[in-house]
Image: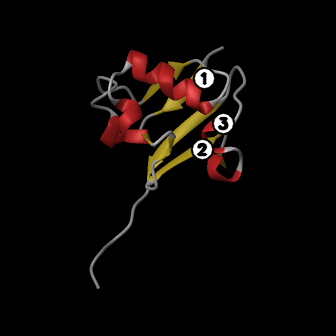
Amino acid sequence: MAIEVRIPTILRTYTDGAKAVEGTGSNLGELFHDLDARHPGIAARLLDGGELRRFVNVYLNDEDVRFLEGISTGLADGDSVTILPAVAGGAR
């Protein structure tokens, strides 16, 4: 089962500059484990204590996984996962 994962610029050092990579898994947790096996260190930037880090947004086919089942969200062949770092801050 191939899942396309779109990688933000800040994490492309883990994917040798690739904007998108393929991974496998029946849910997001398995997908992130598979990605970490192929691209060591990337899971530590996405997960904290087995859950998504607070400032990492993940979308499954344009749906925010926080409103689905988080890292337990099921995946199907051909799905697209987009990882986006949250942007906050600025000057007052």
Question: Mark 2 or 3 closer to N-term?
Answer: 2
Residue 72 sits above or below residue 24 on the image: below
Q: Nearer the viewer, residue 22 or 71?
A: 71
User: Distance from label 2 to label 3 (Cα)?
Assistant: 13 Å
Q: How far across and down, in percent of the image, does residue 42 sit?
A: 37, 31
Dot 1 corresponds to which residue? Answer: 3
> Quadrant of residue 7 in the image?
top left
User: Distance from label 3 to label 1 (Cα)?
Assistant: 15 Å
Q: Residue at x 69, y 28 (%)?
A: 75
Q: Which residue appears farthest toward the front when viewing the image? A: 49
Neighbour tally class for label 3: few under 14, some 14-19, many 20 plus, Cα within 10 Å = some
**On residue 16, which mark appears?**
none
- The reply to whether dot 2 and dot 1 touch (C-beta < 8 Å) is no
Q: Residue at x 33, y 22 (%)?
A: 40
Type of amino acid under label 2: Tyr
Q: Secondary structure at mark 1?
A: strand
- The reply to whether dot 3 and dot 1 touch (C-beta < 8 Å) is no
Q: Which residue appears farthest toward the bottom when viewing the image? A: 92
Dot 3 corresponds to which residue? Answer: 72
> Quadrant of residue 80 in the image?
top right
Q: Secondary structure at mark 3?
A: helix
Question: Mark 3 or 1 closer to N-term?
Answer: 1
Of marks 3 and 1, the one in the foreground = 3
Neighbour tally class for label 2: few under 14, some 14-19, many 20 plus, Cα within 10 Å = some
Q: Quadrant of the N terminus?
A: top right
Report the number of numbered marks.
3
Q: Secondary structure at mark 2?
A: strand
Q: Residue at x 63, y 44 (%)?
A: 70
Dot 2 corresponds to which residue? Answer: 59
Question: Mark 2 or 1 closer to N-term?
Answer: 1
Of marks 2 and 3, the one in the foreground = 3
- The reply to whether dot 2 and dot 3 touch (C-beta < 8 Å) is no
